[in-house]
Image (cartoon, rainbow, N blue to C red):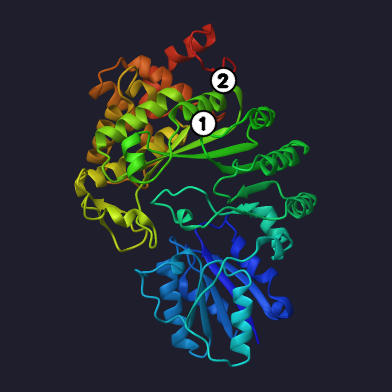
Amino acid sequence: MKITLTTLNSRFTHSAIGLRYLYANMQELQEDTTILEFSINDAIQSICEKLLFDEPDIIGIGVYIWNVSHVAELMHIIKKVSPKTKIVLGGPEVTYEPFRVNLDEADFIIQGEGDSAFYELCKQIQEDKSIERITKITLPKLKELKLPYEYYTDDDIKNRYIYVEISRGCPFECEFCLSSMDEKVRAFNLDEILQEFEKLWQRGARNFKFVDRTFNLNMKAANAILDFFLSKEPPYFAHFEVIPDHFPESLRTKIKQFPHGALQLEIGIQTLNLDIANNISRQLKLDKIQSNIAFLENETTAHIHLDLIVGLPGESLESFGQNLDKLMSMSSCEIQIGILKKLSGTHIKRHDIDFKMVYSDIPPYDILSNSELSFNDIQIMKRFARFWDLTYNSGNFKNSLPLLWEDASVYENFYAFGVWIYEQTDSTWKISLQRLGELLFTYLTEVKELTAQDVADKMLEDMMKLKGRAIPHYLKAYASEFVANAKSGTSGFNKRQA
């Protein structure tokens, strides 16, 4: 019996740790099992061709929010050309109902952590036993699972992020998050994990992305992992998702030792409004959050990524704007602005009536309107988030973008800028860096009525920080004075480049 494990990753540089867990726990069926990974940018019929080339009896597919529509199309084609092939689905998008994408062509569905359940199902199929279409499984004992890390290939290590974990689950109950459905946090055997990480390191792995929801919850484990990396010679990259209010001194001491570019911390803030946080069962300790962000900002070289959500039940645009302004006053780090999604199974559904929550039933199931935000408001904020990524989070306009707001509200000024950009472009995509810079220059000089030379000086610092880059045409008239200032040391530009 031939078995193929597959999924469609959101990008080529991503890798599927879930498939490797399944493969690691296939026991005697492992020699007949193959992993084939694709991305959502690959043509579906080409994926199907490759999956069916060796005529597998079973195809197991990992289903996620970014690929569920693609998987539905893929199943349709597989069943058209190879109806005898059994399709087994697993992953977050099939673990909780209702399914909002038609997955009727799947033969079997595993709901929950299928690390060992997939093997059991394959054995039942092999033995031609009568099987229920949907299998709901209990949580596996993590310390009994075989670990997946040896099944990352040399090509994975060379070209992709290596996804790893030391625990599963989350102790918090944030209603928009699937992790709130977990019963508790469960840990893998730490010694075994560290041995596997050492093997990966010896094979050349340098990009580690931890998928733990609360990396800094268990101090013993967190400190051991940080010590592992601190014992290594850079360059390397380690990404952790951390809770914002738990940075004891032992953790702070270690984080301060990481070299520039080695450590990235993702911190879910979501809202700073205590009433809104209470609506979604989210714990907020504002004093600790502010203290910890200040520590990370001022005493470490870690790259910080903060998250805010638009559309939470009861939160107005004014409240969201206050959140953004507050975070900007606390930190200069990346702020990711997300749009609320209604994931099947999450308790956010309890607010549907009281706050008139209306969501799309098409992935990614994002909010369309609610009692505080109209559909038009949501559309504007989606564009706000996109333009924020292109300008602020990209770091391309580090010196010039703050001219938008100076001492006033970041949110209000960027909101107006985003509305204006969309009026000029009628698009949020395929806007080149050159075009974006020109739009910013025009807005600052013509709408904000700032002095052109002052704006040009800041923009030239931004645009010319890379060697060999040509002076943009809209700044050429101001370049000579900028160069003169650079040579005299009155601008922040590098004298050598001038």
Residue closest to the eye, 75 or 149: 149
- In space, the residues marked 1 and 2 are separated at their CA atoms by 10 Å
In the picture shown, does residue 425 fall above or below 273?
below
Amino acid type of disc 2? Gln
Residue at image position (72%, 55%) is 189
Q: Position of residue 296 (x, y in %)?
A: 56, 27
Q: Looking at the picture, tell me which residue is in the foreground, 387 or 317.
A: 317
Read off the residue under disc 1.
469
Identify whether 466 is placed above or below 496: below
Q: For the image shown, how many numbered marks are present on the structure? A: 2
Query: Where residue 117 sits: x, y (%)?
Result: 60, 74
Mark closest to the chain's N terminus, 1 or 2:
1
Give the labeled residue for mark 2.
Answer: 497
Nearest to the observer: residue 85 or residue 403: 85
Whether residue 307 is visible here, answered yes or no, is yes
- Residue at image x 53%, y 10%? 487
Give the left or right position of residue 99, taking residue 420 as reference. Answer: right
Residue 289 placed where, x, y %?
48, 30
Is disc 1 in contact with disc 2, using a CB cutoff of under 8 Å?
A: no
The residue drawn where x is 38% and y is 69% is 97
Q: Is residue 152 in view from this perspective?
A: no
Rendered location of residue 220, percent (x, y) = 69, 41
